Amino acid sequence: MSPKNAKGPVDLEGTAATEAQIAVHWREEGYFYPPAKFIGQANASDPGIFDRFSEKNYPECFNEYADLLSWDQYWHTTLDTSNAPFWKWFVGGKLNASYNCVDRHLAKDRNKPAIIWVPEPEDADTQVITYQELYMRINEFAALLNGFTDLRTGDVATFHMPMVPELPVAMLACARLGIIHSQVFGGFSGAACGGRIADSKSRVLITMDGYYRNGELVDHKVKADEAVARALEEGVVVEKVLVFRRRPGEYASQSPMVPGRDFFVDELMADYRGQIVEPVSMPAEAPLFIMYSSGTTGRPKGCQHSTGGYLAYVTGTSKYYQDIHPEDTYWCAADIGWITGHSYIVYGPLSLGTTSVMYEGLPTYPDAGRPWRIAERLGVTTFHTAPTTIRMLRKLGPDEPAKYNYHFKHMTTVGEPIEPDVWRWYHDVVGKGDAVIVDTWWQTENGGFLGSTLPALHPMKPGSCGPAVIGIFPEILDENGDKVDAGSGIAGNICIRNPWPGIFQTIWGDPDRFVKTYYEKYNKDPKSTDWRDWPYFANDGAMQAGDGYYRILGRVDDVINVSGHRLGTKELESACLMVEEVAEAAAVPVVDQVRGHAVEMYISLKPGVEASPAIQNKVSQMIETEIGKIARPKNVWIVSDMPKTRSGKIMRRVIAGISNFTDVGDITTLANPDVVNDIRHFVQSEKVAHGDEPRELTEEELKAVKSFGHAE
Ligand code: PRX
């Protein structure tokens, strides 16, 4: 350990390394170079772009992104830092996001497909929605919002929608009116949705009766009832629930419509057919939407994104990093319920006037060839997904891509580190050795990419996202705020030294938490209005190689990443504590070959309560209700006591070691070291008896398991 690290804080468990400092020792891979054919057509193939976006041209370099938009009124100040760190971009400018994504393309491309929607049932018809059709649908829904709800500019509407075209229609209808949308991932439970409704104080919920997932028509409206009830418990009354029907005229849910509260959109729509609503010209810094991000402590954070800065940033990065051309057929297979879908299915691609593909269902339904059949049928040129999906498609259909005649020129991976081996399969088999890949690092909070190769100008390196994107100036700092050097082999906390237009404006309703979580740690002077004093602390550990490429190691707090969904340990544990028999709960990740990680719960019971399978079931059920199916634990272990520090904190890293059959580390400083052996014996013999002993972990999996819980 270097002297620098030795100065770091010594935590209660007596280990000087913080999680951020524990590096993943993947072997450094060699470079892959972009194919000449790609370079020839790329939007950014002139290295002069690096100079245009260099620090000497900051912040005005970002005017180039804003100039990709149509403004009603030009801005007078590119970046206003007077209320640091609440940055304001393009101040004085006015624009409308819906106009930019749709209206402005009509003159030239009225009948070009804007969205191609592929329903999950393979025999159902694909819907091609032209820019004109999208324009009409958005206007009609905006007219409905205006006429039937009392939502007005600046209000929040919560959405709990699946992957159907009605979702972008409703988002862009809100944007047209300056109503702030807050889409909650459709797979989340009613209770999780209700908590987010309460936090954002929405009076209107927009949802759908059902949708297809893995071959079944899922009842979704039932979650709306739970959401409204939960919001009410938290003091927020939902006045109207607008229910789209997956098949207009037929109701796919068992849940009754509540008279005076619930309304079918297709029935209401009759009154608004053909109506056109003028887009409201919004100040650049007006909020466009809220997107909740799970944290480890307290409530999920409502990340508030701006209209002008956000739209400029996603449009610019879509153009240069996604290399989107208007004539492309671009498929980002994320869910619009996540930031990736907002930025890179809806706002970025539509702002550039391209064709954006949306798929309703599971990528492996009915088999692992489905994505490649979609790509072949639609002539997809550009493909975007996450490592968890790539791993699943590789596991279930390693040879499927070769059977289909599609051709990608560009592919993206996002959301978690991608193992070099998985990267190579993506490159060689999915991309047929011919597509350029960008590994994009960013966060819900960021609006758009922070780290990636510029596809025609940088070589790719499996396992690394690449350098910072243009206009972003990161640094890796240790716990003392000292710089960690590139090529030192030491990891630290990755920070961005400068504000950028896509950065979120605040945490909805909680500006203090915003400053505390992202800026306090490395702030040089809380009164300063100079951006140089306010590095953005991304809360990710990272390491920079000698060539300047970053390897992102994941969050320094305790988040369990299941299939790319970040689940806060605190959220999982508080759900368990809602089961009345449970006294204490701890959530840990177990390595899972497909999902990355799965959740395991450890609980101890209140005195006098007997352990039983019924309690285990209740716990699983509660997690499913409170958070969603995705979080359902692989195992719930009932233990007599939890390993604890002397100050009473549960040692999650010790339990994680047990669950993963890895070393539990130093336990001599625990208040109750004896309990560790008891738990280990019980849990591991149960696992072995059920054939659940994990294969030997790779070095990086081992590191991940070991580093979990260190931030406590
Ligand atoms: O730890 C980083 C990881 O995912 C976190 C952000 O998650 P979320 O807000 O859900 O946004 C996901 C989509 C933007 C980051 O703090 N992460 C994201 N992309 C990468 C990554 N880790 C490694 N490589 C990436 N490309």
Image (tube, rainbow, N blue to C red):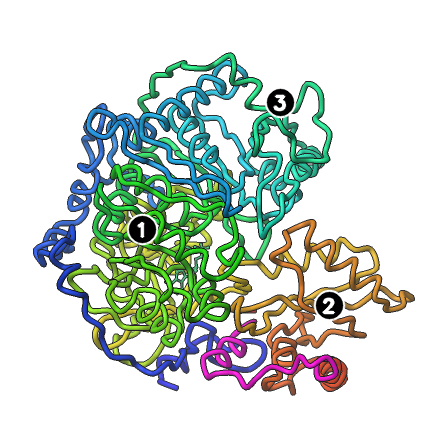
Residue beneath disc 3: 263
Does 700 appear in magenta?
yes
Disc 1 crowd rating (10 Å Cα; few below 14, some 14-19, many 20+) is many
Disc 3 crowd rating (10 Å Cα; few below 14, some 14-19, many 20+) is some
Please tell me which of labels 1 and 3 falls first in the chain: 3
Task: Name the element at disc 3.
Answer: strand
Question: Does residue 117 appear left or right of residue 689 in this picture?
Answer: left
Q: Is residue 481 above or below residue 63?
A: below
Which residue lies at the image location 52% right of the left edge and 53% below the top edge?
Answer: 362
Question: Does residue 680 appear left or right of residue 506 in this picture?
Answer: right
Does 640 appear in magenta?
no
Disc 2 crowd rating (10 Å Cα; few below 14, some 14-19, many 20+) is many
Q: Which residues are magenta?
A: 687-711
Picture disc at residue 380 = 1
> Disc 2 and disc 3: Cα gap in Å?
40 Å
Q: Mark 1 vs mark 2: give the one in front.
A: 1
Question: Does residue 590 appear left or right of residue 546 in this picture?
Answer: right
